[in-house]
Structure formats: structure tokens, C-alpha cells
Image (spheres, rainbow, N blue to C red):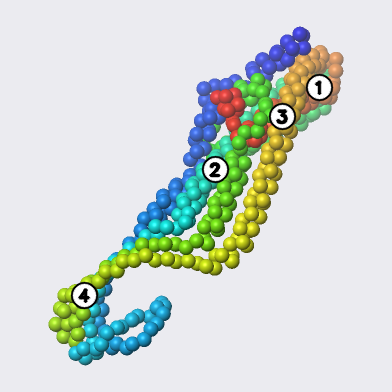
Amino acid sequence: MKYGMLIMGCFVLSYSVTCAQTSENIPLSQLYQEAAAYPGLQAEASSIKSADYDYRLAKQKILPDLNLQAQNTFGTFEGAAGAFIPLPGFFNVSGTGINGNTAVNSMASATIKWDFLRFGKYRDQVQLAQVNQQQARTSFDIEALKLKHEVTQVYLGWMYSNAMHGWANREAERNKNLLQLSSSLVRSGLASAADSLIASTSLQQARGQIKKWEAQTNRFKNQLFEYTGTELINENVPKPFFLITQAEVHNSIPLHPLLTEKEHQQERLEVREEIINHQVFPDISLLAGGLVRGVGFGDDSQAFQDSYQLPINNYLMGVGLTWDLSQWYSKGLKTQQVQEEQQRVAQEMEVVKRSLNEQQNSLQFHIQKSKEEIIEAEAAYQSAAESYRLFKVRYESGLIDLTTLLQIQQSLQFTEKSRIEAYYDYWQYWNNYAYTQADFSVLTTVFN
């Protein structure tokens, strides 16, 4: 019972000595909201929109292809029988020359092609676009989770360096008091002049520590501003930093975005396998076309007028079949390739599961031991503070020398620093644990 009262007293002391929370403290949840505008996260959001457009385009591929063209040409008109395969760079002239070897041609045509039977190929493309959509959202979730972890780490770093800055200030104040006290004792003849020199040296060292932690605090503030665009004004350490949360860790492994990412990769490979299976089937299309054409022979103005009369009208309708037969002998190799990739992704997914499980077990152990370390550190700090008070009174009475008192002060300095580091390590463990759980609700509740 006495031990429990001692620890409770240590907690109360830590509130009054080290930190006081004011309305200027920014909740961690607010920092998360402001970090949503971070460019790295916005880039992932743009990827989601791009995947959404790809999905909509994939659904539109069921619509028929419609093409329209019109042209007016002037040139020679010499016909010859024969056959050719049309390739880029060729044009065709058909018919018999009339009124010389020149003609003016006008022609407009439209064609429509509808692949109404593709044996599942269209459905495969839509499914692939859906999986890509889900993959883009999962990538966003992963980036958001990493950003929360980084923001929390920087926020904890700011609190830690701020607490250490306060620690350095208190150490400097103690050394300043010792310098004044030793100077007074030297004047009274109760201490040697060397005491003042020793106290002055300790004061200079403490002031150096103040500068060091000022720089560290400023570095974390700048990093937090980079992520959130928010500048921390309050110089006090939030009170919850020196609290042990009552939240309990648990062994359940939620569906972490890293696992979801691997699941989507598996789904994508399954769709790819379906695409390979369907590529061996032909495409059956409905074809239709219409054409109007006019021609004027000769090189006078009447030929140009005649070319716009468009007396020739044609249409064409039918059914077409295209079949890439080479897919039959490449299907086996492509299928084996996809299956190997599926095995690779499955193994990678197992690695992620084991890694998350190991990290959670390790962090649960560290959190529990860190609690015990904090209790011991609080007790040691309380004992060292009381010892320093008693030995300082003895030094004021001339019963001990300054060297002995400085040794006690170093013990107080060490235990106070260890206490701050214990709390920092404790919250770092919680931050890492929240990342493995993909749930930062414990931290947002504490630092609210």
C-alpha cells in the first residue's frame, strides 16, 4: 500500500514539475487531419481517381467502334487490274481513265464495328479494372498509415526533446543555485575557492545541454510543420506524455493494409489467368458501313463541281470473325508463368503475416516491461530528488564538500533523464504497435 502511494505521489509530482497541459496543445487527431493534405498522400489519392477512370473506360469498351471520314482529292486516274495487300504508305486507284488522266474525287464513309461476342474477354477487362481500383485504394491506406506513424513519431520526438529541454533547464538552475551558494560559503570561509570554479564549470555544461535540446526541439517542430503545415506554439509538454495508458494490448491480427495489398495482387493474377484462358477464343463482330462518293474527270472547274454530286452510294453489312490462333500454343507457358507469380505472392503474404505477428508479440512484451521500467524510474527519481534535498542542506551547513553534493546531483540528473527516456520509449512502442494493428485510436484518445 505504501509503495502504491509512493508511485501515485511520483505521478502527481511529474505533472507539476515537468509539464502542464494548456489549451494550446494540438490534439493528435487534428494533426492527422491536417496531414491529409501532405503531397505524398495526395499523389496516392490521384492514383485512385486514375484507377476509377480506367474502370469507367473498361466498361465503355462494350460499345461499338464508330469511325467517320471524308476527303476531297485531285490527281491522276489510271486504272490497272491486280491485287495488293494494303500497307502503310500505299494508296489505291481503281477504274478506267476518262477525259484524260486526271480526276477530282470526293468521298465520305462511316463504319461501325461491334464485338458482340468475345467469350468473357470484356468481363475480364472490367474485373481487372476493378481490382486495380481496389489496389489503388489499398495503396492509399498504406501511405496514410505510414504517414500517421511518421507524424506520431515526430510528435513524440517533439515532446521528448521538449521534456529534455526542461530537464536541462532544471539542471542549469540547480547549478546556478550551487554557484551562488558556493560563492557565499567561500566568502564566509566555509568552502574553498575551488568550489565556485567547479560549480561554474557544471553550469556551463548544463547551458550547453540547453542549446542542444533547443536545436532538437526546433528540428522536430520543423518536421511536424512539413507533414501538417501546423506550427507548434506551446512550449509545454502535454500532460499525457507522463501517463501510462490503461489500454490493453491484444493478440488479434486485423486485416492490415499490407496483407490486403497482397490479396489484391493475388486477385489480379487470378484475373490474368482468366484472360489467358479466354484469349484462345475468337472475337465475333457485327460490321456495317456506308459510303457516298462523287468523281469529276478532267482538269476544269466542271470536274470539281461534278465531284460534289455524290452519285455513288453504297452500304455494307455483315458478321466478322477474328481469331489469333497463336494463343493456343502460348497459353501453356503464360499460364505457368502466372501460377509461379501466384506462388511468389502467396509466399510474400506469409512473410508479411509472420512479420506482423512477430512485431506485435515483441511490442506487447516491450510495452509491459516498459510499464515496469517507468514505475522503477519514478521511484528512483523520487528517491534521488529527496537525497539531493537532504545533501544540499548538509552542504549549506558545511558538513560535506561540493564534490559529494555534485555526485548526488549527478544521480538526480541521471534518474530524471532515465525517467523521461522511459516514457518516450513507452510511447514509441505504442506507436509501433498501433502501426502493426493499423489502429491509432489509443494514441488519439490519450493525446486528445
Query: Mark 4, mark 1: which one is toward the viewer?
Result: 4
Placement of 60 over or under 170, stated as above or below: below
**Dot 1: what SS?**
helix
N-terminal of the pair, mark 2 or mark 1, is 2
Measure the alpha-carbon separation of dots 4 and 2. Answer: 58 Å
Q: At 38% from the left edge and 80% from the top edge, which residue is drawn? A: 90
Which kind of residue does numbered mark 3 sit on?
Answer: Gln
Check disc 2: other Cα within 10 Å, few if <14, some if 14-19, many if 20+.
Answer: many
Query: Mark 4, mark 2: which one is toward the viewer?
Result: 4
Which kind of residue does numbered mark 1 sit on?
Answer: Ile
Foreground of the two, 145 or 76 = 76
Q: Is residue 39 visible?
A: no
**Dot 4: what SS?**
strand
Indicate which disc residue 408 carries. 1
Measure the alpha-carbon separation of dots 3 and 1. Answer: 35 Å
Which kind of residue does numbered mark 2 sit on?
Answer: Thr
Which kind of residue does numbered mark 4 sit on?
Answer: Ile
Measure the alpha-carbon separation of dots 2 and 1. Answer: 55 Å
Query: Mark 3, mark 4: which one is toward the viewer?
Result: 4
Query: Mark 2, mark 1: which one is toward the viewer?
Result: 2
